[in-house]
Image (cartoon, rainbow, N blue to C red):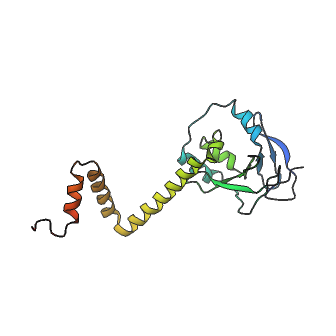
Amino acid sequence: MAKCPVCKNVVLKLSNLEDSLPVRQCRSCGGYWLRANDYARWLKSQTPGSFEEEKTKEASTRFPVAESNQTAICPDCGHFLRKYKISAKVDFHLDRCNNCNGVWLDKNEWEALKAGDLHDEINQIFTAPWQQNIQNKTITSKLDAMYLQRFGESDYQKIKEIRAWLQGNPNRNYLMAFLLDKDPFST
C-alpha cells in the first residue's frame, strides 16, 4: 500500500494522468506518483515535442506548483527522493527515486511540464548534462546581474559590444596589449 511522500499517511489511489498513463494520486495534496515503467510504456506512444524554457516558466506561474520542501521517501521502495531542477528559470523541482526511478509530481507540476512541452522529456531532466546546463545558466545569470550592477546598464552594454568585437578580431592580442599598457605611446 503506497503512501503519499508528502502527506505521509494518505494512501495513493490508482488514477490516470493522461490517456494510458497510470499514476498513483494523493487525494489530499493533489500530487502524483509516476512509476518509471508506466511512464516508459506511455512515452512509446508519444511524439516528442520541443522544450521551451520560457513556456514552462510562464506555465508554472499559471499553474502554481505546491512544492514541498521536506524530505520525501519513495512510496514504492522506501529510498529518499532526490530533487532535480527543471531549468534555470523555473522555480520548482521534480522529486525522483534514484533506486526505482519513480517520480513524484507535486500538484500542478504535470500541467506546467505539459504546457512547456517537457512532459515527454522527463527522463532528460535527471541526466548529468541537463543538470550541468542548468548550473551553467544559473552561474551565468548571477554573473550577468553582478556585472550589470557594478558597471551600470550603459557601460555594461558597451563593454559587451567591445568584447564581442575583440573576440572576432585577428589583432585581438595586440589590441588587448594596447588597452592594458599604461602608456602605449612611450618607448
Which quadrant of the rendered structure holds the C terminus? Answer: bottom left
**168 or 44: nearer the viewer:** 168
Q: Residue furthest right?
A: 1
Q: Residue 42 sits in which quadrant?
A: top right
How many numbered discs, if any? 0
86 displayed left or right of 30:
left
13 displayed left or right of 164:
right
Q: Position of residue 130 (x, y in %)?
A: 57, 48
Q: Position of residue 46 (x, y in %)?
A: 66, 31
Viewer can see residue 63: yes
Viewer can see residue 64: no
Q: What's the residue at 77%, 46% (across, down)?
A: 100
Q: What's the residue at 73%, 38% (across, down)?
A: 39
Residue 95 versus residue 152 in the image, above or below: above
Q: Position of residue 164 (x, y in %)?
A: 30, 52
Q: What's the residue at 19%, 66% (across, down)?
A: 181
Q: What's the residue at 64%, 55% (across, down)?
A: 92
Residue 101 versus residue 20 in the image, above or below: below
161 displayed left or right of 118:
left
